[in-house]
Amino acid sequence: MGTYVFVYGTLRYGDRNHRIIAGEKLIAFQASIQGRMVDIELGFPAIVLDDSSWVYGEVYEVSEETLIKINALEGYEPQQDPYYERVQVEVKTDCGFLNAYTYYMEADQVKEWSTIASGDWRLESIFNRFVPYYFAYGSCMDTERIEQAGVLSEFDRMGQGQLGGFELQFTTHLPDGGRADIVEADDMVEGIVYQVTTSAVHYLYEREGVNVGRYRPAVVDVDFNGELLPMLTFIVIDKQEELAPPDHYLREILRGASPDVSTSYLAKVHERAALLRQSDVTSVEGEL
């Protein structure tokens, strides 16, 4: 068995140093640790380990040979004056918690540098270069509320996209029922790809409750017309046990997905909602 390593900067998928770990086993593509990310203005970030926020990254199981290469990249030489320190941390994933090594700096080393509020280097790196496509998998596949908000012109519907390695679930709760989320699994999520403007992104941040901590923006790699492209999407932060979605929300998903999303996938979403409703009824009856 190899060593688990949590990576959050240029070792992440799609970044310039990912080649060092590209052949290693991916454990979690969406993972997080408590900490604060800063931009040290050299083309890569650093993190401080505290409980002020969250840092997002990936977890890999690496060989001893690869771990040595990572140590060299991070300037981790315990017998000398290391550039980064290395420590084992608790990592949160969609499959639970695990322990992994990561590399960090002390707070006094980074006090002159600005905090990256999102805690997501890949997200920041992409938005510094361009506005990516947006991958909608829930109610934003439907444009009715977008039109009511007066921003439909900021969304150009491109067609169907497929996100491998994830499953659609309803893991966040509102008073009337569950809302959609994507969770890492051996499955595939279909959705709608939009070309969006900066104004559209601002609307989505507000609609998805980014500022109140309901969803977070993230970059996922979506198969669109046979090409794998990095796209903006939104992922639930505090995932809870699944709860059946209300009828009006499910209608938005099904209406918005048609006609681009496959009928077999739509049937699968409808069936999942029906099973959750039955489970909710059973749970209530069991409490009586």
Image (cartoon, rainbow, N blue to C red):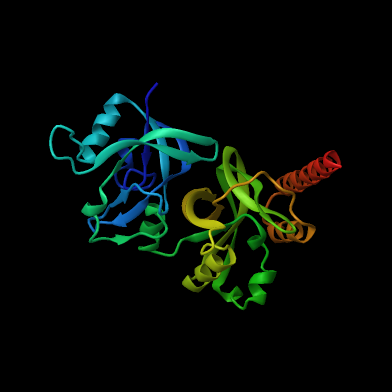
The single residue placed furthest to the bottom in the displayed view is 150
Q: Residue furthest front?
A: 288
Lateral position of residue 41 relative to residue 265, left or right: left
Q: Quadrant of the N terminus?
A: top left
Label total for image:
0
* Residue placed most toward the observer, 32 or 69: 32
Q: Is residue 238 above or below residue 128?
A: above
Question: Is residue 47 depicted above or below 86 in this figure?
Answer: below
Place residue 167 in its image quadrant. top right
Q: Where is residue 170? Give x, y as percent.
A: 67, 49
Measuring 48% from the left and 41% from the top, which residue is drawn there? 92
In front: 159, or 149? 149
Where in the figure is residue 201, as x and y percent of width and height?
A: 50, 67
Q: Is residue 248 visible?
A: yes
Residue at 73 percent across and 59 percent down: it is 249
278 vs 107: above or below = above
Q: Quadrant of the C terminus?
A: top right
Residue 259 at least partly seen: no
Give the x, y percent position of residue 157: 59, 65
Looking at the image, the residue that sits furthest to the top is: 1
Q: Position of residue 159 (x, y in %)?
A: 60, 59
